Image (cartoon, rainbow, N blue to C red):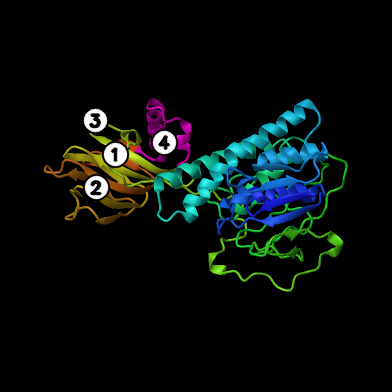
């Protein structure tokens, strides 16, 4: 018997997935992390890092005293070795499973957790933190997605602890993640993420967090010869239908499948606080988040120079639809350029003043201007303005012309991309810094 100290979080689900898959008898002891149970003295003797899950094996293989194990990765390895299941026995397969188990424990779990914390629970928005963890989670999703392109499961042909470790950190975010649907192999609609047949999973008396997800089984064998057990799916709103596990104040005991009966009712949930539960449209491009986008006096490396006094900061370069959004910064006065638009332009002035010789208005901070397709105009920065900064949304391109309409040059999203790529490489930002804003 395994005593499982548990609360329904991704790390907790890793262990219930293993115990259910391996048909190991276990009893759940709820650790309500919202009530601070993880800091109680009795629990700290089992998990000195005051984190759940933790287990006590009351019948260890050496026939000695009960053994306690804390940390989800260590628990999965302990259970795999105890049962001889879900960990490849050959040298290379075992090596791969352990690599990806530790990849999840050291990377995917912590980064996805911070992403969720700063995006959902933080008392105030911190753009730098949000962007940092969104980008790192995005990178890790990409690592897993590429790895699964040529494999049935993470460690190869067999379902293993590597899949159990990663899967609970993938499924709860599929519908709500801003970066999820761009990963066809492990993302929404993928085969690896397709839920297994229905099976009951543990439910707590005070289930105030997400339900345990189904496991990522495909039509393949596992590391052992035992057949898979059915697992219960989530309903359309992401709510797990409860089972009739016996619950007491001190302990939740998991009953056998033959004893389980449908529960009379499930906990009332505020639907307004549930994220959208359906997959995003197939083929939808990833969204973009740029922290501190309007910070004009931040990192100078963000600004792509076009001359000694003119630079731009790209916010999106959309090569598929032929438009871009950037902040144009000019640190000189006089005529900047004369150009004709092939598409509409939207302008929002952030600093300084500017105007067109062809119009009688002058744009100041907070002013918005629409420039229709086909218009030709001459941009001027007044003599008393030391710096002008304006956000431009440009569809199509500019053709630079002389006063009589003869073409002198052009600029569009592709020339902007070329300039930005060269600049960011020269300042050491690397390709990823630019690729995050290219669509």
Q: How far apart are marks 4 and 1 (CA)?
A: 18 Å
| Residues drawn in magenta | 411-437
Q: Which residue is depicted at the point 33% across and 42% down?
A: 398
Magenta segment includes 434: yes
**Mark 4 or mark 3, which has the lower sequence index?**
3
Specify the principal SS of the magenta part.
Answer: helix
Mark 3 lies on a secondary structure that is loop
Q: Name the residue that disc number 2 marks.
A: 377
Q: Name the residue that disc number 3 marks.
A: 308
> Callout 2: 10 Å neighbours few (<14), some, many (20+)?
many
Q: Quadrant of residue 226?
A: top right
Contact (CB < 8 A) between labels 1 and 2? Answer: no
Q: Distance between the residues labelled 2 and 3?
A: 23 Å
**Image mark for residue 417:** 4
> Callout 4: 10 Å neighbours few (<14), some, many (20+)?
many
Q: Which residue is depicted at the point 48% across and 34% down?
A: 432
Q: Quadrant of residue 240?
A: bottom right
Q: Position of residue 169 (x, y in %)?
A: 62, 47
- Nearer to the camera, 386 or 400: 386
Mark 1 lies on a secondary structure that is strand
Q: Name the residue that disc number 1 marks.
A: 400
Q: Which residue lies furthest to the left in this view?
A: 384
Q: Where is residue 38 in the image (x, y as percent from the top left)?
A: 59, 52
> Callout 3: 10 Å neighbours few (<14), some, many (20+)?
few
Contact (CB < 8 A) between labels 2 and 3? Answer: no
**Mark 2 or mark 3, which has the lower sequence index?**
3
């Amino acid at each position: 018997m395994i005593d499982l100290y548990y609360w329904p979080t991704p790390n907790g689900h890793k262990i219930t997935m293993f115990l259910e898959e391996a048909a190991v008898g276990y009893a759940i002891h709820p650790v309500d992390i919202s009530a601070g149970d993880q800091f109680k003295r009795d629990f700290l003797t089992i998990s000195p890092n005051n984190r759940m899950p933790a287990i006590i094996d009351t019948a260890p293989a050496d026939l000695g005293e009960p053994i306690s194990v804390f940390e989800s990765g260590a628990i999965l390895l302990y259970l795999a070795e105890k049962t001889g299941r879900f960990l490849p026995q050959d040298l290379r397969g075992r090596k791969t499973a352990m690599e990806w188990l530790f990849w999840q424990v050291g990377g995917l779990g912590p980064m996805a957790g911070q992403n969720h914390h700063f995006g959902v629970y933080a008392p105030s928005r911190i753009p730098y933190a949000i962007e940092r963890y969104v980008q790192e989670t995005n990178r890790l999703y990409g690592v897993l997605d590429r790895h699964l392109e040529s494999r049935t499961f993470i460690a190869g042909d067999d379902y293993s602890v590597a899949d159990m470790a990663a899967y609970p950190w993938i499924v709860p975010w599929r519908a709500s993640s801003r970066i999820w649907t761009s990963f066809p192999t492990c993302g929404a609609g993928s085969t690896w993420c397709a839920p297994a047949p229905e099976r009951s999973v543990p439910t707590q008396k005070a289930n105030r967090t997400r339900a345990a997800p189904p496991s990522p089984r495909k039509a393949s064998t596992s590391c052992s010869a035992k057949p898979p057990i059915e697992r219960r799916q989530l309903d359309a709103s992401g709510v797990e239908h409860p089972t009739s596990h016996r619950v007491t104040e001190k302990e939740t005991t998991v009953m056998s499948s033959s004893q389980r009966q449908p529960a009379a009712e499930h906990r009332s949930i505020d639907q307004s606080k549930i994220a959208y539960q359906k997959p995003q449209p197939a083929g939808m491009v990833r969204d973009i988040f740029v922290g501190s986008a309007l910070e004009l006096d931040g990192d100078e490396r963000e600004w792509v120079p076009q001359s000694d006094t003119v630079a731009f900061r790209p916010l999106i370069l959309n090569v598929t639809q032929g438009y871009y959004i950037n902040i144009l910064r000019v640190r000189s006065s006089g005529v900047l350029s004369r150009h004709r638009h092939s598409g509409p332009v939207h302008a929002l002035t952030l600093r300084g003043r500017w105007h067109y010789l062809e119009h009688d208005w002058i744009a100041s901070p907070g002013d918005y201007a629409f420039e229709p397709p086909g218009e030709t105009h001459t941009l001027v920065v007044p003599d008393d303005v030391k710096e002008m900064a304006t956000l431009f949304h440009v569809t199509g391109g500019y053709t630079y012309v002389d006063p009589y309409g003869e073409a002198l040059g052009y600029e569009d999203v592709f020339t902007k991309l070329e300039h930005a790529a060269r600049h960011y490489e020269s300042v050491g930002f690397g390709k990823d810094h630019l690729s995050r804003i290219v669509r």
